[in-house]
């Protein structure tokens, strides 16, 4: 027997109508269930780029969600306003007894959700929230001392010991889908939201559940080789599901269950990537100060980064003179995506070679990545800068040339995004400044004219980075 006559489900970073924890719980608990999504002005108005790819992805995914709910006899009420106000007002207007939503551990979202919950309860409306975007969250995986893990490998081992089939079970919608209300409203266009199309079709990026399902099905055909191909940006190695995970157009439980059941080396390697995601989310939950630019390791909070003039701009604009770094930055600018190996390489290069504060790079990625996730972005940047969760000390510094030689040996990825290097012979593609003048002329690539000379000398900058951290370690 339902406990509530009517309930409202608030969709956020969970834009799907299947295996949805909050929707499942609402349908089991209420006689009628309305659904809502708010294009939150507090988030959208802060975006500087009016062609932000994320907004187009979300808008089109919301359209797909409403269509899917309609096929079940339901609907989707869509608003464009301040979410913390809109949801409370909508719940009161609809006369619901309860509001259901899924967790979001971004500190901004936690503050917003707390304000919404307080306002709803003051009106006598119950609030229920659920785990949905990760497998194990918050305090579900702790050390034997009851404290959060700060190093990944022991966290992964504990995660694997904690995991049971219960955590991977789906949250079905079908049994009570007849309780969905057909109430719906118009969805604002990109123009209504103040944004312009970002060209997702040109990138062959399909938003919504259909796009996620297509990528997942494709990846399952090659998951057995994931551990061999994932680090090579010119190969089709990754799942490319990160943006769908970010906005919940796929179910992380379904993905993890597939990897768990497969059990092969490739599937195990991919499952470890999903565990990394859980790891960074629980770190952010325990350390919300990381969202405001604090280092996980307090001794590095005030590290005196030199920030040489022009270095950050050269990195952003793919003018460093190191082909793999520049190609990766072009990929980010042109597509809103960057291969995971290259995220590590470019972050290490900015911090350890260019000696630029990691927070500047973190902010640039936050602005440009279509799959931007605060927990993963903060965790990844701090890992690369050696100020975060890492068992290895600060002397890990990626050599951009050897990384290029190892992971793009034929320069295929480099040439794709750096056409000015297209004719450079393989033996010079990773360090074109070593190319003799005659070879430069033949390749139509004059160093310093057609492609920049290296902005820094790696060996020298490595020593400077080590000295910077060595001095900080003494304090």
Image (cartoon, rainbow, N blue to C red):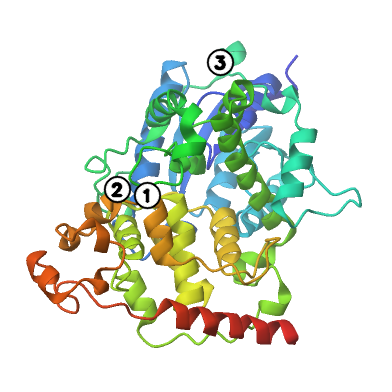
- Residue indicated by mark 3: 177
Badge 1 or badge 2: first in the primary sequence: 1
- Residue indicated by mark 2: 190
- Residue indicated by mark 1: 55
**In the foreground, 98 or 378:** 378
Local packing at callout 3 (Cα closer than 10 Å; few below 14, some 14-19, many 20+) is some
**Secondary structure state at the residue bearing disc 3:** helix
x, y percentage for residue 247? 48, 41
For the residues labelled 1 and 3, the Cα–Cα distance comes to: 29 Å
Badge 1 or badge 3: first in the primary sequence: 1
Identity of the residue furthest to the right in this view: 145
Front: mark 1 or 2:
1
Local packing at callout 2 (Cα closer than 10 Å; few below 14, some 14-19, many 20+) is some
Front: mark 1 or 3:
1
Q: Are marks 1 and 2 in contact (CB under 8 Å)?
A: yes
**Secondary structure state at the residue bearing disc 1:** helix
x, y percentage for residue 178? 55, 13
For the residues labelled 3 and 2, the Cα–Cα distance comes to: 30 Å
**Secondary structure state at the residue bearing disc 2:** helix
For the residues labelled 1 and 2, the Cα–Cα distance comes to: 8 Å
Residue 322 visible to the viewer: yes
Say whether residue 137 is left or right of residue 67.
Answer: right
Does residue 335 sit above or below 237 in this rendering? below
């Amino acid at each position: 027997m339902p406990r509530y006559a009517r309930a409202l489900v608030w969709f956020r970073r969970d834009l799907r109508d299947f295996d949805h924890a909050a929707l499942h719980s609402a349908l089991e608990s209420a006689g009628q269930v309305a659904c809502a999504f708010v294009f939150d002005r507090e988030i959208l108005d802060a975006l500087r780029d009016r062609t932000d790819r994320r907004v187009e992805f979300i808008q089109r995914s919301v359209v797909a969600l409403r269509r899917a709910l309609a096929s079940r006899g339901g609907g989707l009420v869509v608003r464009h306003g301040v979410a913390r106000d809109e949801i409370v007002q909508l719940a009161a207007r609809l006369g619901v007894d309860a509001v259901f939503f899924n967790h979001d551990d971004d500190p901004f979202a936690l503050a917003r959700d707390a304000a919404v919950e307080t306002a709803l309860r003051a009106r006598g409306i119950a609030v229920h929230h659920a785990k949905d975007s990760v497998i194990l969250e918050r305090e579900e995986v702790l050390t034997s001392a009851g404290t959060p893990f700060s190093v990944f490998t022991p966290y992964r081992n504990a995660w694997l010991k904690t995991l049971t089939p219960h955590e991977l079970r789906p949250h079905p919608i079908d049994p009570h889908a007849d309780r969905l209300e057909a109430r719906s409203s118009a969805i604002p266009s990109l123009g209504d939201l103040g944004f312009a199309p970002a060209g997702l079709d040109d990138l062959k990026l399909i938003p919504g559940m259909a796009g996620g399902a297509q990528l997942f099905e494709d990846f399952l055909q090659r998951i057995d080789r994931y551990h061999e191909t994932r680090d090579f940006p010119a190969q089709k190695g990754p799942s490319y599901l990160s943006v769908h995970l970010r906005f919940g157009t796929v179910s992380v439980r379904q993905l993890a269950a597939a990897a768990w059941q497969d059990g092969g080396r490739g599937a195990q390697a991919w499952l470890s990537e999903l565990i990394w995601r859980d790891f960074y989310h629980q770190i952010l939950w325990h350390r919300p100060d990381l969202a405001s630019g604090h280092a996980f390791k307090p001794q590095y909070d005030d590290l005196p980064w030199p920030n040489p003039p022009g270095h950050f701009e050269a990195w952003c604009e793919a003018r460093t003179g190191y082909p793999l770094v520049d190609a990766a930055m072009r990929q980010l600018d042109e597509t809103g995506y960057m291969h995971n190996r290259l995220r590590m390489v470019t972050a290490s290069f900015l911090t350890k070679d260019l000696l630029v504060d990691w927070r500047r790079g973190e902010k640039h990625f936050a602005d440009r990545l279509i799959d931007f996730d605060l927990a993963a972005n903060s965790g990844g940047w701090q890992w690369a800068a050696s100020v975060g969760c890492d068992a290895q000390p600060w002397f890990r510094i990626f050599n951009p040339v050897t990384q290029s030689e190892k992971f793009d040996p034929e320069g295929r990825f480099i040439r794709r995004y750096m056409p000015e290097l297209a004719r450079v012979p393989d033996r010079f593609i990773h360090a074109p400044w070593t190319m003799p003048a005659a070879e430069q002329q033949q390749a139509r690539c004059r160093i310093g004219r057609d492609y920049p000379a290296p902005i820094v000398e790696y060996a020298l900058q490595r020593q400077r980075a080590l000295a910077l951290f060595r001095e900080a370690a003494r304090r």
